[in-house]
Amino acid sequence: MPHWVRAGGLALAALLIVSACKRAEAPAPAPTPAPSPPVSAPTPTAAPLAVQDISLGKSVGADKSIAELATEFAPTDTFYVSVKTTGAAPSAKLTALWTYEDGQSVAESSEAIAPTGPATTEFHVSKPDGWPPGGYRVQVFLDGKAVGTKELVVK
Amino acid sequence: MGLFGDKSKAPPPAPAKPKPKADFSNVKTGSSSTAPPPAPAAAAERIYVVKAGDSLSKIAKTQYGNANQWKKIYEANKDVIKNPDLIQPGWKLRIPE
C-alpha cells in the first residue's frame, strides 16, 4: 500500500473517531418533561358568617349603612342600628333587642339572611308618641349568640 | 319620753316610689338587609298509591284525619285527577303537608 494511501486512511479513521466522539459528547436533547397531572386549584371555602361592625344612627342609606351616626337622639327620632357581616351562611338569623334603662324591654326584631359575602342588615325602631328620655341599649345577636351592644341616650 | 316626743320612734321615711314603667307597646320595628333571605324549604309531600275502594275523602281521612281535606289532595293532583269522584287504583297521588 502506498504511503499516502495509508496516511490518508489513518487520517480518515481519526476524523471518524473524532466525529463519533463529538457526536457522543453532544448534549442529549433535553427530555420532554412528562406531563404532570393537572392540579386543580383548591376550592375557596367560604368564610363562616361573622359580625364585623355595629353602628348606630338616625338614618340609613340604600346600602343599609348608617348615613348619620349618632348616640344622642331626640324623642321623635327613629333609632337605626346597622350590622355589617362577612362570610356566608345558607341561613342565619340576626336579632336586635332594644331595652330601656334598667333593662325594660322595648322591642325585638329579627331578620333571616343567607349572605354569600359581605352584607349589611339594618334594624330600626320608632315610637309615634315619642321616646321617654333616658338611656337605651340595643343588643345584637347572631343565631342567638350576643355579638355586640350599643348604647344611646334620648334627651 | 321627752317634751317633743321620742324622735327615735319617728316613722321611717317612706320608700321611694318605684318609677312607673314606660309604655313601649306602640313601638314600631322594621328591618332589611342587603343579604338575600334563606331559600324556603322545599314543601314536603308524600306519595300515596290509590287502592281499590279508595276515595279522596277516605284518603284525606287516613292522611289528615279529616275527610274534608280531600280538596287539598285534589288540588295537588289535578294533573292526574280529572274527576274527584273517580280515582283509579294504582294512581300515585301527592299528599301535601
Image (tube, coloured by chain):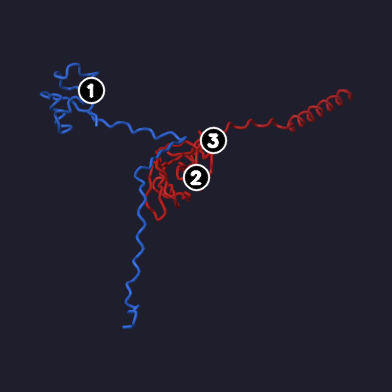
Chain colours: A red, B blue
Q: Secondary structure at mark 3?
A: loop
Q: Secondary structure at mark 1?
A: helix
Disc 1, disc 3: CB below 8 Å? Answer: no
Give the number of callouts: 3
Please give the residue where the numbered disc 3 appears in the rendered image: A41
Using the image as rendered, state which of residue B53 and residue B13 is in the foreground: B13
Q: Earlier in the sequence, mark 2 or mark 3?
A: 3
Disc 2, disc 1: CB below 8 Å? Answer: no
Return the mark for residue A62.
none
Please give the residue where the numbered disc 2 appears in the rendered image: A56
Residue A57, percent from left and from top: 50, 43
Please give the residue where the numbered disc 1 appears in the rendered image: B75
* Residue projecting furthest to the right: A3
Q: Amino acid at mark 3?
A: Ala
Whole-angstrom CA distance, mark 1 to mark 3, is 49 Å
- Front label number (2 vs 1): 2
**What is the quadrant of residue B63 in the picture?**
top left
Work out which quarter of the rendered image holds the N terminus of chain B and state it.
Answer: bottom left
Circle 2 packing at 10 Å, graded few (<14), some (14-19), many (20+), is: many
Using the image as rendered, state which of residue B70 and residue B18 is in the foreground: B18
Residue B84, percent from left and from top: 16, 19
Q: Amino acid at mark 2?
A: Leu
Q: Secondary structure at mark 2?
A: strand
Q: Are marks 2 and 3 on the same chain?
A: yes
Specify whether residue A150 is in view: no
Disc 2, disc 3: CB below 8 Å? Answer: no
Q: Which chain does the numbered disc 1 sit on?
A: B
At x 11%, y 23%, the residue is B52
Is residue B80 depicted above or below B43 in this figure?
above
Residue B82, percent from left and from top: 20, 16
Is B21 displayed left or right of A12 in the figure? left
